[in-house]
Amino acid sequence: MMTAIMAMAAIGATRPPQERLIAADGVVTGRIGDTPLRLRIDPAAPAMPLVTTAIAERAGLKGGMFGTLYGVGPLRIPGRTAVTRIDFGTGAVKRRVSFAPRPYAAGFDGVVGPGGLEEPVVRFVLRGPLPGERTVALPMVDQGGMMGGSAERFASITVGGERLRVRFDPHHPRTLATAAAGVRLASAFGGTVSGTIGEEEIAFGIRRPVRALTLSRPLDIGPIAIRTLGVRTTDNGDASAIAEAGVEPDPNEIVVTAKGKHDPDRDRLSLGADALARCSSIVFDKPAKVIRLTCA
């Protein structure tokens, strides 16, 4: 989750290209003023460009009155913002840029999601076309709230009668659900957890505890059928209500399945490289407010 001021759109004298093609690695050479930066255009990243404090200082940016706060589980990464001209590889535009001490992605000076690009349609080309592939259009939503436009762009699906925000994260190997999202998936698709608690990197180099969740009935998102994923055990909820694989419940046992009020708008499912392995492209069509996913 992110709290930030909305990115300010630049008004150009000429009409920008209607579609931007992004290679699988997302790497472009960007620039803030005269300062070059190694930038990743990432389908899972916020719309507000995020760079490191080191780059911001090198470019002479001075933080203004608006700040940002990036959350990874219980951890918070504070940032500052400034309005500047930034080049995402196709020419400089005026944007509010956030900067934080830690890099969002290792090896990069900055990241930006499709919501922050000038072009109305952004196509991430993951690989060449695959035999038997088909395309599905999913509703596109932002984070919600007054600052939601500065955050990621999600697909919206329905699980258990409520909306679940889905983001596309090909730069992380594993599909992950936050805790409460995992509970919803387990309830809707007959899920159980198994194995020991491991860790997965989420963002900013922060690793969070994860367990394996297996669904007895697959979650279908267009051409993708998800049967196994990771559940973040304590992030945005508590996954302890999910049944253990191979353990029969005691009929006399009282089980507490909820603690406090659950806000489904905070639930997240991130499709990693495992789920996207048979997908050739992800298209963010901002005017139509749809995400087109093409997979075999």
Image: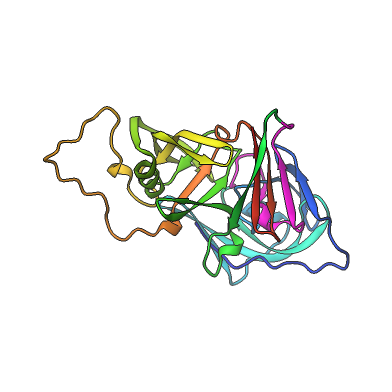
256 and 44: which one is in front? 256
Is 104 located above or below residue 171 in the figure? below
Residue 286 painted magenta: no
141 over 276 or under it: above or below: below
Going by the image, does 282 lie left or right of 161? Answer: right
Question: Which quadrant of the view contains residue 117?
Answer: bottom right
Image spot of residue 295 (x, y percent): 64, 36
What range of the chain is rendered magenta? 103-129
Q: In the image, is residue 278 above or below residue 263?
A: above
Q: Is residue 24 visible?
A: yes
Indicate the quadrant containing the C terminus: top left, top right, bottom left or bottom right: top right
Which percent across, then down, holds residue 205?
Answer: 52, 42
Indicate the position of residue 16 as horizontal and vertical percent values.
84, 59
| Residue that appears at 43% across and 56% down | 162
Residue 182 appears in which quarter of the rendering? top left
Tell me if I can see residue 50 in this picture: no
Q: Is residue 211 left or right of residue 133?
A: left
Q: Is residue 235 left or right of residue 39?
A: left
Q: Outermost residue, right direction?
A: 14
User: Residue 185 sits in which quadrant?
Assistant: top left
Q: Nearer the viewer, residue 276 or 148?
A: 276
**Colour mode of the rendering:** rainbow
Left or right of residue 148: residue 41: right
Q: Is residue 124 magenta?
A: yes
- Residue 219's spot in the image, x, y percent? 47, 39
> Residue at horizontal 62%, vertical 57%?
99
Name the residue at 77% across, 49% down: 30
